[in-house]
Each structure stands twice: as structure tokens, then as C-alpha cells.
Image (cartoon, grey):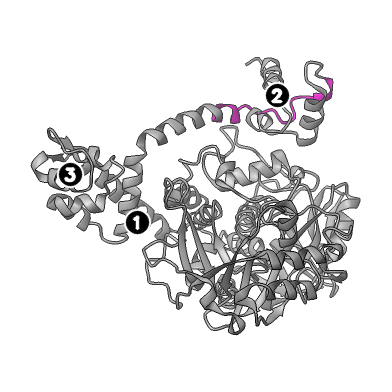
Amino acid sequence: MTFNYDVIIVGAGHAGCDAAAAAARLGSKTLLITMDMNKIAQMSCNPAVGGIAKGQIVREIDALGGQMGIVTDLTAIQFRMLNRSKGPAMWSPRAQSDRAKFTETWRETLDSIPNLFIWQDTVTELVIKNKSRVEGIKTSLGAIFLARSVVLTVGTFLNGLMHVGKAQISGGRMAEPASFGLTEQLQSLGFEVDRMKTGTPVRIDGRSVDFSLTGEQVGEADFHKFSYLDFTPRPLKQLSCWTLYTNEACHDVLQKGLKDSPLYNGQIMSIGPRYCPSIETKIVTFADKLQHQLFLEPEGENTQEYYLNGFSSSLPLSIQLEALQKIPAFKNIHIYRPGYAIEYDFFPPTQLNHTLETKRIANLFFAGQINGTTGYEEAAAQGLMAGINAHLKAHSFDSDKTPRDESGSSNSDSEFVLKRDEAYIGVLIDDLVTKGVDEPYRMFTSRAEYRILLRQDDADRRLTAKSHDLGLADASRYALLKEKEVQVDSIIAFAKNYAVKPEQMNAFLESIGTTPLKHGVKLQDLILRPQLTIEKLAEFLPEFQQQLDKIPNRKEEITEAAEILMKYEGYIAREKIIAEKINRLENVKIRGRFDYSTIQSLSTEAKQKLTKIDPETIAQASRIPGISPNDINVLLVLLGR
């Protein structure tokens, strides 16, 4: 039988779920295909969302109308804002989630979307027309589903192979089968393919842990959340995480097992993550360190299962267990399952456009680990953008040829792209399609050159209006944004105009060790002092407190946003000027205008890389590794610039 849809999403992980939700909510008749409907949005590794730079991505997903932030808030069992000791550009939200409730809540979310349908099956083949455009998929049950756009979000399942010591098990996750056929078909169509490796730690029975020998890490209970829509208290019981350390005895056991480690005996040859190394990699790379910190993280509100963050391993089961028993808190340890490594196929993302549509096959989109990334958040961000663009391509006036907006990299009627100064999502996708990957890609704040513009607190101000124009962020979300903007602006206006006299504040200023006033100043001048906050100043200025009390809801969020904008006004303005200069090059389109191989003034490396990447703009060309300023000047001269 044959069935017809607008958009098909293959894979119901974090990328697939946000892709399907976005396409369906935008109006596409959408099919989400998964091998197991009980494993939707499975947290394959640690049961946590967010973290350094990743938390900013989740705030952006929410600001755009995605679902990951909402689901995380509903299922959080701990919340923390990381990097509070640094400036607000570095603040990053992170939450522990109840693993089972996370999956259950995502399933309920998907089931509630009218245009979204779910099918349990394995996709074995794409339906390709003239080797140039995808038209649907075929499954192991013999079903054929046709669609205008297809998004592959297949995670670690393509030819997945798991390793525990010398044991090798075919699968995409523990106890779940691998997927075969798609890699081979895409390779036959000319796609470049490679292998990557990732891993996950042992799962521990909390009843066997001596928590008195660990350090407690409690969560926070303030107003911060991931979703801008949610102002209610967290519904689940809040739990602690626990810290502990490996020791020399533990390392001795691990060292003894290296001869049987798939990472060191030649069994695993693929690329692994630099920034989330296995415990065996740690003891080899950092041989001088006598201990490594571990985090024991709860898997749920009503389970004894714990995730041992920092102890990812593919060593034999006996070695993992013996090494753990050398840690005092784990003397009587019981485990649910050992850690393991998994190898899987991915497609180097330089084969994609910024919309995440493949260059070789029209209407086919890749999102998530298939693009060489790691992390739930990076996957969901790609899924959201791929889902949006798959919907737009499916409904464009000519689905074979996507018209482009000549005004810049953002948003024509048939594509939605974010620039590097607009979102971490823009940085993520531009890095992937421009630079490619030589290891599993993970987002860091250091990857973004405009960190002050891309703070977690203002993702809604940056992105919600764009998504509302697109049709994804609904009217209620947009109304909340406009209300927030009015309230923030009113606080700033009051602070710029309200005069503070020395007699009002000097006693307080001296008590906290900051310079007293010699004459009257505007309130904003005091807010700029690092020792002072709006909340502190309002205690001594009744008129200011009255101004804050006028805020109908989200008072803490709005006050924080206003304070950041005032304290960092100069830095924000300077970074905007720099971004605007760079964005002029984003408007200089070059795709299709050069045969790079014939330009004698370019270096050989530049010819090869420009031909392979085929950059859309001069700015994208300048970010390709190996392209020099001289190469860019050559192109500008040829353009008559």
C-alpha cells in the first residue's frame, strides 16, 4: 500500500521529535516513523538537558516555538544555572530530567498535534526520482510512504555496532536493533560517509551506594526555567546529584584492562568525542592525574537507577565492575548494565545547505547525529530547523528549485536560516556545513563570536518574532514577548530618568564597600555598578519599587533582562557593530558565480575547498578552514567589490 504525506521524519529521537512537531504545527501533514513507539525521545545517555552553551540552544528552541524546553520543564527533577560566577553571556541553564517521564511527556505532546501521525517500522530505502529528488520511503513491512520532503534523524542506528570489551553487538542502542540499507543507498548516490563513535557509562543501583562518602549537589529553586511560557512551580520532586572521585586503585584496575579495551586493541577505529572522553581515555591522556571527578545523577523521581557521569567506558564488564569497587562509595556496588561504546555511520555535513537540505538530493534533509554532532540539544536544534525547512520546501511554489532571498541569509518564503549573530543554532549549522567535522561536534560558548548577543535570557527577544512571522510561534507566545519588551523598556526608561540623591543611598553604599555619591546621579548609573542590583536598589527607593510592582507577571525574569541590558549596554552595542560589518559579506552571494578551479590567483587548497563546500556567500567562504584573507580578497576583486 502507498500513503501520502507532506513531510516524513525518519527517527523519533530528539531531532525527530522537534522536527515532526514543527512541520505538523506549521500545517504539513506529517508522518513520524520510529522503530519503537515506547522509545520516543529516549535519553540514550545521561538524563539531562542543557549545560554550557547547550542550555542557550534549548532556550532558542523554545523561543522559536519548539518543544524540548517545555518537555524538560515538565519533567525536571533538578535545575541549575551554570556559570553564575561569570557574566550573563556565559550563564547556561541545565536540568536533570526523569527519563521515563521525559519520553512519556514527549509522546503525549506528539499525540496532541492534529497533523502529526506516527508509524512503527524500520525504513530500509528512500524513494528517489531521477537520482536527484526524494519522493518518499520504503519500510521493512513493505509499506511505501510518499512525501514532498523527507528528514532523516536516524541517530546512532545506521549500521550501529556496540562494544563491551571484546563483545560486539549489532544495535543502535542497548537492546535495540541497528538499521541497514540507507547508508548503502546514499553512498551509491554519491554521498560521502564515515564512522563515528560515542559511549555511555554504567547504570548503578542507588541502594548499593554509600552516599555518606559522596558530596551532595543540590539544585536551585528560583524562577529560571527553559520555556518562556511556563511560570508554574516544577511539578516533580526535586532531587540532588552527588559528586565523588576515582582513585589510584581504580586507575590501576582500568590500566590492567586496557589490553581488552576496544579503543586500544584496534577493535574501534572510528572518531570519538574529544570533550566527553571515556574513563580509559582519561587515564591514558591524563596519566599524571591521580583522580577524576564523577557525578552520580538520578534517572528519575521514583527509581533507584543512577547515571555515573564521567565514567563512560567500553571496557569488559569485569573490569568496569572491579574498578568501581575500588571507589569507597561503591564498595558494595550493584549495577543495572555496564557502559558501552557504539560505532555508527554519519554523513559529513559539508554535503548540506544551511537549510539542512542535502546538496545532492533535493527535498532530503539530515538532522542530528547523522550530521556528526553529539548531544540532545544540538540534535533538537537541527531537527527544529530541518522540520521548518522541510515544511517550507514541501509547500514552495516549485519544490525542485528553492528561491533564495537576496537580502541576506534569513528567510525567504521557502527557507528559514539563522545567522551567527542571531542564535547559537545559527553558529551550530554554519559550523557544520562550512567547516565540517573531524570529531563529534559539541557546542561551546567559545564557538560563538557574538556571545554577548546570544545570551540565554534574551532568546525570545532575538527569535520569537521571526518564528511568529513564520507561523510556528503562536499568538499567545508572541503576546508574552511583546508584554515583556514593554515592561523591560519601561524599567530602563525609569532608570535613565530617575534622579538619586546622596542622602538616599550613601549609608547603604558605604555599608557594601562601594563609593558613596558626591552629587545626584541617574538611577542607571548606580545599576551599572557591579556590586548593585535592581533588587537591592529597589529596597531603598520606594518609587522604583512601585515601578517594579506594576509588572503583572514574570517580574524576576523581566527585572533580570532589564538589568543585563543596562549593565552590558556598551558591550552589546559594540558587538552589534562588529556583527553588522560581517553581515555585509553575508549579503554578497557567490554560489554558482565561479569555477574556482580556473582562478589562478587562488591557492590550491582554496580551489579544492571552495569547490567542495560551494559557499553561499563571501562570509561563509571566509569561515572555511584553510581559506586565507588573500583568497577572499581575490574573490572580492573578481566580483568588482
- Expressed as whole percent of the image width and height from the top left, the position of residue 145 reads 77, 66
SS type, badge 3: helix
Q: Is residue 154 visible?
A: no
Question: Which residue bears the numbered disc 3?
Answer: 510
- Expressed as whole percent of the image width and height from the top left, the position of residue 129 reads 84, 53
User: What residue do we see at 78% from left, 32% from top?
Assistant: 609
Label 1 – label 3 distance at C-alpha: 29 Å
> Residue 417 magenta-drawn?
no
Q: Which residues are magenta?
A: 583-598
Question: Which residue bears the numbered disc 2?
Answer: 628
Counting residues from the start of the chain, the first of labels 1 and 3 encountered is 3
Disc 3 residue type (three-letter): Glu
Question: Which residue bears the numbered disc 1?
Answer: 557
User: What residue do we see at 70% from left, 51% from top?
Assistant: 274
- The residue nearer to you, when weighing 41 against 147, is 41
Question: Which image quadrant: the N terminus?
Answer: bottom right
Q: Is residue 46 left or right of residue 516?
A: right
SS type, badge 2: loop
- Expressed as whole percent of the image width and height from the top left, the position of residue 97 reads 54, 71
Disc 1 residue type (three-letter): Glu
Disc 2 residue type (three-letter): Ser
- The residue nearer to you, when weighing 353 against 539, is 539
Question: Which image quadrant: the C terminus?
Answer: top right
